[in-house]
Image (tube, grey):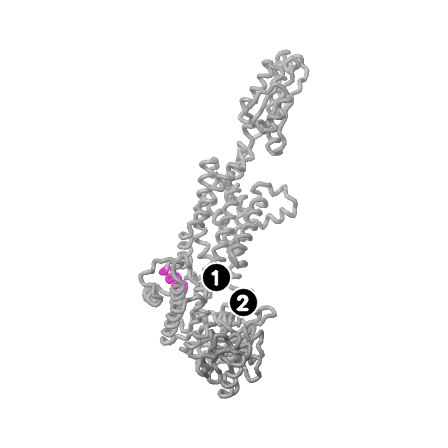
Amino acid sequence: MSLLSLGCLRPVIKKEFRQIRRDARSLMFMAFLPAFMLLLFGYALNFDVKHIPLAVVDEDGSRASRNLVDRFRTTEYFDLKAVLPRTAAIDPVMAREDIRAALVIPPAFSDDLLAGRSPSIQLIVDGSNAMSGTTAAGYAGAILLSYSQRVTLDALERRGLTGFVVPLDTDVRVWYNPELRSARFLIPGLMAFILMVIVTVSTAFSVVREKERGTMDQIRLSSIRPLELILGKVVPYVAISLGSAHLVLLLGEVLFGVGIRGSYPLLLAAMILFLTCALGQGVLISAVTRTQQVAFLIAVLTTMLPTFILSGFVFPIRNMPAVVQAVTYLVPARYFLAALRAIILKGVGLGAIWRQFLFLAGFAALALGGSAALLRRGETERTPRRRGRR
Amino acid sequence: MPEYAIEVKDLTKRFGDFTAVNAVSFEVERGRIFGFLGANGAGKSTTIRMLCGLLDPTSGTASVGGFDIRRQPEGVKRAIGYMSQRFSLYEDLTVAENIRFFAGAYGLTRKALEGRLPWVLRMAGLEGRERSLTRTLSVGWKQRLALGCAVLHEPRIVFLDEPTGGVDPASRRRFWELINELSEGGVTVFVTTHYMDEAEYCNDIRLIHAGRIVAGGSPGELKTTVIRNPILEVSSDRVVDAMEVLQKEPWVLETSIFGTSLHVSVGDEAEGRRLVRERLAREGIAVHRLDRIMPSLEDVFIHKIEERGGAGGAGEGRP
């Protein structure tokens, strides 16, 4: 008995394609839901802080204070939403979330500046969203610092000390994602997440359905071998989800400007390996469950949370406690994500990510082999006492 | 060629502490229609699933088509066709697509398929409906299509697990005609059912109760040899009252209700007739007719179960 004789593969593949075609809902689910989720997540899961609504309380009203306000106005990080008469007016506006930050310039700002005293500028930030609050404070701090530097240099120049330079000139460069846009970082993660969940759920369903309807017995008594059945089920789903993955890539490029820097064949190989992992996990789940509901639950639980939390999609793995880090090694999305970011953002070759490929291949082989073995063993002792004794 | 199509020896299946099939032994001659009769849960399906290789037996041996079910499951697979009461078809495929898929699944060549496809369609009465979705067919049609798909590869032995469950009487009759055709073509048919009337179509029968075979033989043999005491059929408007009264009498061996009549087993025919009339008259229960009848298979079944001390209660054996 040879595992490599796959004579019955064709009828299974044909049958699966026909069934998928007839089941319009599942087809839409597999083909378009990933793209739809990309739109949803791509726009909602945005960690960039730009266009922070800002209010200004300019109690000084001098040229110098207007100059400072202009500096905020001319960046894309802040949008001047309101000019308020006094500090007390900030609270209600911020409470309504009309503004997220407020700049308060004290009455003697210009005089103090000219006199060489250090005037204090107050910046109020809405901290209810810690992430964007911190970022807003950071941007404002940077703007104020550069303004303060400018003022210092001007003052020194006025005293005749020309040619003075700032002692430390930092030049920060961000590689791979120069604008630090979160879309670049998130889209590979989204692809992994979406594909994993959808593919695993769809395949888990397809095998359990055969059990529920009793067609599995018929198949077990035919000449179809377990491996043929599994491959026959996997091939159509790989084809469809590959199409859907390309749609996600295309949308990523068109809508979010995330182009592929690295080699496309390498990317394709990574996707096929990863999809095979997801499919393998789906088949494995269906091999150990009896009803579609249970299969759905397990598929969602074992893909959604691990892929979202443990893959490095949103939370960096190196910041996790050691135990949790250990668990992440079991999540195939972790390897796919690393490979995907490396290929799409950094444009690296196989040399840098062969380990990820190896892990993915291992996971895929284990899942597919395991489920073929489970199907071969059949129901063994687990036949339910359908009508048992009374 | 083996003498018997199926040989079973001490076949047993246990699920935990529950014995579903208990040391069952029998032989099935080639080309015969073999009926396996019993109530739901008696062990019929479990036996058939073991013989097909879908379930491992706990102990005992069996050979199907000359192949040992434990050591040569692949041989068994090639020799048999199997159909269960769930009519394992793909509801979202058309009639022709189902036939083509199963033809592929059994490894039929394209040429063989072209010959078998019209045959299955004709047999199932589905000519002209090749493109209908299986889901839209009535139960009787699905049943015949499922049988057609199960015998696409022309197996020598066919296992039918409660094939007529949930099917209307007219379709059941048509289905049994198909079974007869298969049998005339030399195919051995192993069929389970809990409809006693269907057992009449079988050449050979085994009655199974609580995992054990309690009687066996042809329908005629069973009816003449198992029950030696005469059975009187009492027609009355008040059969339930009549049964309650007669059950208490020491000279009544067994009673059971069949629709509007009561079957009463007695020691002697003439004496029995007199006592039944007398006793029921005393209760004011009118007797329309009182005849001695040939026991039905159901009588045989009930008799056998009660003889065994009513494991689980006499009522359990009834369909």
Q: Mark 1 lies on which chain?
A: A
Q: Which residue lies furthest to the left in this view?
A: B128
* Rendered location of residue A233, percent (x, y): 45, 56
Residue span colored magenta: B95-105
What residue do we see at 41% from left, 58% from top?
Answer: B91
Characterize the local packing of mark 2: few (<14), some (14-19) or many (20 or more) Cα atoms within 10 angstroms: few
The numbered dot on residue A387 is 2
Distance from disc 2 to disc 1, alpha carbons, whole Å, reads: 29 Å
Q: Please name whichever residue, B139 or A116, is drawn nearer the observer in this view of the structure.
A: B139
Residue bearing mark 1:
A226
Label 1 secondary element: helix
Res. A27 in view:
yes
* For residue A253, above or below residue A138: below
Label 2 secondary element: loop
Residue B177 located left or right of residue A287: left
Upstream in sequence: badge 2 or badge 1: 1
Q: Mark 2 lies on which chain?
A: A
Magenta stretch: helix, strand or loop mostly: helix
Is B96 one of the magenta-colored residues? yes
* Rendered location of residue B267, percent (x, y): 53, 86
